[in-house]
Image (tube, rainbow, N blue to C red):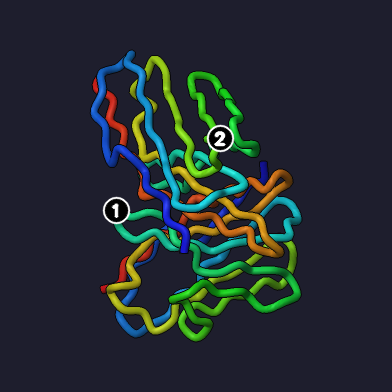
């Protein structure tokens, strides 16, 4: 099956710093999604990407769908303490009734005030 | 996006027993999904639950262990049967809305003793 490699596994940054994380796959996806999960909560959708090369922003977050359709990155600018959490990438491949998401292993972000 | 609730939010169960988890959505949705998130791990799809048909299970998951019901377009249940400590996980339901975006419920945290 498809696998996603997400890096880094964890990050420790100071408040105000920018952060970048990425996901790569051995096969293509039609859609890339980025989620954030807080402790004890379900994942919350941050950004959805639908076209190769697409660059999308949501406030301080920016994500891009790689031109090869096999990778994506998420940038967070000017980090704040509430950015703490686990960030997951997810890829979706369309095909018949296949709506399955494949998730990366997550990036644990810690922001020091 | 749809508002998704799950019951119970958490439970502690004895080995060999079964637990039924409920997922309620505030709008009608076609596609509902059940995921498992083992401690410190990413999300793994258990099955896709469509109204009016049997659930479609992913490799490694079987109906006898994880029976699913989908009686209407706003509700689904997942039962974890004959539980063992290895079933201790967070169980999450999600729904797919227009644009192929999946939104998650808050999860059910299960501990099996």
Chain at tag 1: B
Marks 2, 1: nearer the viewer = 2
Mark 2 on the same chain as mark 1: no
Q: Which mark is residue B81?
A: none
Residue at left 55%, top 69%?
B47
| Crowdedness near tag 2: few (<14), some (14–19) or many (≥20) residues, C-alpha within 10 Å | few
Q: How far separated are the C-alphas under marks 2 and 1? A: 31 Å
- Whether residue A8 is situated above or below residue B38 in the rendered picture: above
Residue marked by disc 2: A67
Q: Are marks 2 and 1 in contact (CB under 8 Å)?
A: no
| Percent of width and height locating residue B57 | 55, 74
Which residue, as the protein is rendered here, is positioned at the far front? A68
Indicate the position of residue B93 as horizontal and vertical percent values. Answer: 55, 59
Residue B49: quadrant of the picture: bottom right
Left or right: B44 as drawn, with respect to B15 = right
Query: Against A15, is B91 above or below?
Result: below
Circle 1: element type: loop
Label 2 secondary element: loop
Provide the residue designation for mark 1: B40
Quadrant of res B19: bottom left
């Amino acid at each position: 099956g498809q696998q996603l490699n997400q890096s880094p596994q964890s990050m420790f940054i100071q408040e105000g710093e920018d952060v970048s994380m990425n996901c790569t796959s051995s096969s293509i996806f039609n859609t890339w999604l980025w989620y954030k999960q807080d402790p004890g909560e379900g994942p919350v959708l941050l950004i959805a990407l639908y076209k190769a090369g697409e660059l999308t922003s949501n406030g301080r977050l920016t994500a891009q769908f790689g031109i090869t359709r096999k990778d994506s990155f998420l940038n967070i600018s000017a980090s704040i303490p509430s950015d703490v959490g686990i960030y997951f990438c997810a890829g979706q491949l369309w095909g018949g009734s296949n709506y399955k998401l494949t998730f990366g292993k997550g990036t644990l972000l810690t922001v020091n005030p | 996006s749809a508002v998704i609730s799950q019951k119970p939010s958490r439970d502690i169960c004895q080995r060999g027993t079964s637990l039924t988890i409920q997922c309620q959505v505030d709008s009608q949705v076609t596609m509902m999904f059940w995921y498992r998130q083992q401690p410190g791990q990413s999300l793994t799809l258990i099955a896709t639950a469509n109204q009016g048909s049997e659930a479609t299970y992913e490799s490694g998951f079987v109906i006898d262990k994880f029976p699913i019901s989908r009686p209407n377009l706003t509700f689904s249940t997942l039962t974890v049967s004959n539980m063992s400590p290895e079933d201790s996980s967070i169980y999450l339901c999600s729904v797919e809305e227009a644009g192929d975006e999946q939104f998650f419920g808050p999860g059910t945290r299960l501990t099996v003793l």
